[in-house]
Image (cartoon, rainbow, N blue to C red):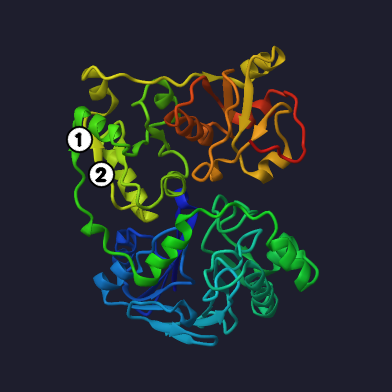
Amino acid sequence: MYFEQFYLNCLAHASYMIGSGGEAAVVDPQRDVDLYLEAAEEQKLQIRHIFETHLHADFVSGHKELAARTGAKIYIGARAEAKFPHVSLTDGFQLKLGSVRIRILETPGHTPESLCMVLTDEEKSCDPWAVLTGDTLFIGDVGRPDLSRTHTAQQLAGMLYDSLHQKLLALPDSVLVYPAHGAGSLCGRNMRAERSSTIGTERLTNYALQIKGREEFIQQLTTNLPTRPDYFLQDAEINRSGAGAMTDLLPLSALTPAEVKSRLDQHANVLDVRPVDQFAAGHVPGSINIALSGQFASWAGNILGLDSDPILVAETEAQVEEARTRLARVGVEGVSGYLAGGVSAWQKAGLPLVVTPQISANELGDKLRGSSVRVLDVRREGEWRAGHIPQAKWHALDVFPHQLPVVEDARPLAIHCKSGYRSMIACSLLERAGHRNLINVVGGYDAWHAAGLPEVSEQPVKV
């Protein structure tokens, strides 16, 4: 038997290929599907089956393109009401793949149609050896229950409790657990960094499985949920119909500085994907920085939205292509083009650049002692609660698309997150809104903590 996990760091997304008897099944494929075709060729397997554990909300799946390129059947939960040709799955459905038996467990809770796949390699044992849990059970966490248009979070949380305790925890402790996401995904809130676990380990260590009683579980699972990005429900609908092939995306246009400036004057979105330090040193006025180095696509989908039609600014054409691919993975397809020659071309055309000052944590500490600067923390609420700078106000970056923080006076505003990545996104959004005297804190709260500077834990004061 062949089994491989494909992990996409930028989306904290895990997909899988199972192979036996010359056939293969792919589970929860990412948007760009060439990696599965290459793996199947290397293993001398034919992809005949594609399984979706649910309608994914945080990325666009490649199931439709992969099926078109291989002739494989797509399998998805009956409650998904999928609009593409598929096999509807219900509890107890089984598929033989060579020596491997795949058994379906309907596990509603994260979404109504969620399911898990129990794998048994009958060449080795009649007992199950692994379960692919989708977004039902993570390593250290469970799926969030607020991603449905048809059910309340409380209804889904109750279903999730039943699915966990009646279905997954009924499996032997030795069964391996392979989820669809890892730490960093917004489909949960407390995932550990490991890529796999066992039912026994999760039974003992997963906080959600320690909660006593269904009502308490519902209460805890529906309290203090991370902000749900607007594009999540849109992605689920794209996946219900099936996305077009990546190869159908049109080539990007190379735009001159004059063309980019003209479009900026008409309020176009200009997305600078360069590293934070390069953006800080000089950037196109009104551009937004979301660096390729982090969870680029998730933040782009959250901050800009799927219909934003951004113009890209990068160092190289290779970075432009990488950004285009990563944007398409979350459903941002209408990229308007890119600034040919990058910032250097903009500068050579005699157009102005904006510089965003940066300071270290120690420099911020010195300035705070003189009350010459204000501080804005843009981390998530759980991060704030765990510890923050005493003088800081709080406004999570997640909610910037709906409401920018109030900037009360002309004193410099130092903005920080955990490491400096999200804070530069925040700086660029505030700059675009016309605010000045903004400073990015290099290294963020991690640097502040490492320097031994004062910290407090308390309820956030939002601005």
Q: Position of residue 72 (x, y in %)?
A: 31, 77
In-image side of 376 versus 30 (left or right): right
Most distant residue in the right direction:
212
Q: Amino acid at mark 1?
A: Leu
Q: Position of residue 103 (x, y in %)?
A: 52, 83
Q: Earlier in the sequence, mark 1 or mark 2?
A: 1
Query: In what quadrant of the picture does the C terminus appear?
Result: top right
Q: Amino acid at mark 2?
A: Ser
Q: Nearer the viewer, residue 327 or 315?
A: 327
Please give the name of the residue rendered at 68% of the width and 80% of the height, measured from the top-left corner. Answer: 166
In-image side of 308 versus 406 (left or right): left
In-image side of 357 versus 200 (left or right): left
Q: Position of residue 251 (x, y in %)?
A: 19, 48
Q: In this picture, is 357 found above or below 199?
A: above
Q: Which mark is residue 255?
A: 1
Please give the name of the residue rendered at 23% of the width and 55% of the height, measured from the top-left corner. Answer: 249
Residue 56 showing in the rendered view: yes
Distance between the alpha carbons at the discs numbered 1 and 2 = 9 Å
Q: Residues within 10 Å of mark 2 (few under 14, many from 20)?
A: some
Residue 44 showing in the rendered view: no
Q: Position of residue 452 (x, y in %)?
A: 73, 24
Query: In what quadrant of the picture does the N terminus appear?
Result: bottom left
User: Are the two marked residues, 1 and 2, in contact with CB atoms closer than 8 angstroms?
Assistant: yes
Q: Which mark is residue 336?
A: 2
Please give the name of the residue rendered at 22% of the width and 18% of the height, measured from the top-left corner. Answer: 348
Q: Nearer the viewer, residue 216 or 12?
A: 216
Q: In this picture, is 79 found above or below 364?
A: below
Q: In this picture, is 144 found above or below 184?
A: below
- SS class of the residue under badge 2? loop
Most distant residue in the top direction:
370
- SS class of the residue under badge 1? strand
In-image side of 456 versus 108 (left or right): right
